[in-house]
Image: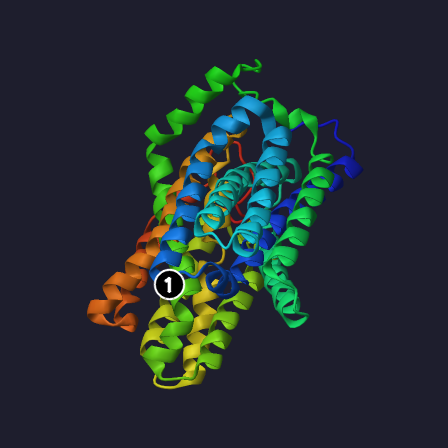
Amino acid sequence: MDSTMTRSQYVRWRTAIFAIFLASGLSIATWAARVPDIKDEIGVDNAQLGLMLLAGGIASILGVTVSSVILARFGARRGMLGAMILFGLGVAVIGIGAEVFASPIVVTVGLLLWGFGNGAVDVMMNVEGAAIEKHSGKTILPLFHAFFSFGTVLGAGLGVLAIAIGAGVLVHLSVMAALIVVIAFVSVANVPATEDEVVPAETGEKLGWRERLSITLSAWREPRTYALGVIMLGMAFAEGGANDWLALGVVEGHGADPALGAAGLAVFSVSMTVVRMFGGPLVDRFGRVATLRVLAVTATIGLLLFILAPSLPLVFVGAALWGAGVSLGFPLGMSAAADDPARAAARVSATATIGYIAFLAGPPLLGLISEHIGLLNTLYILVALIVASGIASPAAKPIAGSTVGAGHSHGH
């Protein structure tokens, strides 16, 4: 990173990326909070709604996949600004499609715009977060991901408020879309322009975007990408699986009432957010690999407890350990992928693509399997994936020259 950066420039840059992570979480929870209303307005059943949400998910994967090309072609500032305007617009289009046109097609177009923009910005903000880690020499990505979680909590809370005061889907989503676009312009103005140049350490030459594109594709030929992918796969699968099935597991698997199901998911989310807030210093103390191993064990114990617990309090303890255990898989996988600044965008994009596919494709897959063997039994698949994730954790070892995530107990 540019060593001439002043302290205040650094703080503005870091704050800008915090705001972008927050906006990304905010955008998801904003429309997700209104799904029941949107469903009523456009008159679709659960299966049709599922297909619409899947379209948004596929657009996200597409956004993640081409993000490094966008980054190579336009640089971080223009790339992030364009992607954020796109997902802000998507949120507004979902509202317009629901209330003005009552059209599943228009809502789907909104989900496609939102998905593509949010997927693309996801990689770019993680690359920026990793550059900030390099600049400070500390593990900060988990904290950035905590801000993403705050964004989802804030978005859900504002959704509850909007429903309580009787705000329609159109007004609510349009106001939030405008807010997201304002955050985009203010944040991007504080991202240093130097980030637009990707300079490989070996040569120090400025690269054209075509050369950068070939670097992008080369990430898919590296074994480490797939090993990091296994870490991300297990953790993202277990995180996505919790979002979609944990509440139902409490209700159907343990016979509790729906309010306790929602409470179980809240326990999971709070636990995950808390570990993301305070996880950075732990990683700096013990190193990335040791932290991931301990968390894989924690998640495994939590899941087994959640499945097998004879009483509800223990189910909640299981949910808390499950949340804590999967909390750092995604941020530390991203951090490890970005160890070499010259190849950060390509590697983060490749690793994130694997994580995203697990996050999006995993839950529907669990649903299909659970029809045959029951929901709690299906969760054993997550246990197996978490164990694989723990076994693959040495792949996150910092590469030569990187001080972030190495821990004090071992040198670089």
Residue 412 showing in the rendered view: no
Residue drawn at 66 percent across, 64 percent down: 167
Q: Is residue 300 above or below residue 289?
A: below
Residue 157 showing in the rendered view: yes
For the view shown, which residue lies furthest in the front direction? Answer: 101
Q: Quadrant of residue 185?
A: top right
Determine the secondary structure under disc 1.
Answer: loop
- The residue under label 1 is which amino acid type? Asp
Please identify the quadrant where the N terminus is shown.
top right
Per the image, the residue denoted by label 1 is: 45
With 216 as the anchor, is 97 left or right in this view? right
Disc 1 crowd, CA 10 A, few/some/many (<14, 14-19, 20+):
few
For the view shown, which residue lies furthest in the bottom direction? Answer: 311
Q: Position of residue 162 (x, y in %)?
A: 65, 65
Q: Is residue 217 above or below residue 324?
A: above
Q: Is residue 192 above or below residue 19?
A: above
With 39 as the anchor, is 126 left or right in this view? right
Q: Position of residue 156 (x, y in %)?
A: 59, 63
For the view shown, which residue lies furthest in the left direction? Answer: 372
Q: Position of residue 190 (x, y in %)?
A: 73, 36
Residue drawn at 37 percent across, 63 percent down: 46
Q: Is residue 264 above or below residue 115?
A: below
The one of 4 and 12 positioned closer to us in this rendering: 12
With 237 as the anchor, is 168 left or right in this view? right
The one of 22 and 296 positioned closer to us in this rendering: 22
